[in-house]
Amino acid sequence: MAKILVIDDEQSIRDLLDTLFRRKGYDVVLAESGRKGLELFRREHPDVIVLDLKMPGMDGLTVLQQVRNLDLRQPVIILTGAGTAEAEQQVRALGVTEFVEKEFSLHCLGDSLKRLLNNPAPST
């Protein structure tokens, strides 16, 4: 069973994604902050990370940079409510292929997850 690490400071988003992914048969690990997310990444070795960009304290870009320092091939879906072209360009430069707005459809998020689980190596 694939393990998904969700890193998002919004409780409602974490709860929604936890329910969605568990119903699809995935094991889910939740983190409410970037620091906690990095700790869980090191301990849990998830198949995919779903990462919010805008978080207090350690933001998603910093988390992503630290994840890349540890594992260049770790599949990551960036989830953000305030996506800009500049932010998208920054995360794509770090090997992220999936960038989803929080105003997402659950179907689009499910499709992104399937793509990464079926082809986990990010294109650079």
Image (spheres, rainbow, N blue to C red):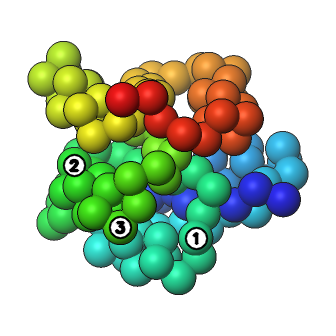
Q: Residue at x 66, y 34 (%)?
A: 119
The quarter of the picture where residue 118 lies is top right
Q: Which residue is drawn at 22% across and 49% down?
A: 61
Q: Where is residue 65 in the image (x, y as percent from the top left)?
A: 23, 55
**Could you tell which of marks 3 and 2 lies nearer the N-terminus?**
2
**Could you tell which of marks 3 and 1 lies nearer the N-terminus?**
1
Dot 3 corresponds to which residue?
70
What is the secondary structure assignment of the residue under circle 1?
loop
User: Residue 45 got which mark?
Assistant: 1
Dot 2 corresponds to which residue?
61
Q: In this view, does 123 lie to the left or right of 64?
A: right
Badge nearest the viewer, 3 or 2: 3
Give the residue type that dot 2 points to: Leu
- Cα–Cα gap, marks 3 and 1: 11 Å
Q: Where is residue 92 in the image (x, y as percent from the top left)?
A: 30, 29
Give the residue type that dot 1 points to: His
The quarter of the picture where residue 29 lies is bottom right
Q: Which residue is drawn at 46% across and 78% down?
A: 42
Badge nearest the viewer, 3 or 1: 3
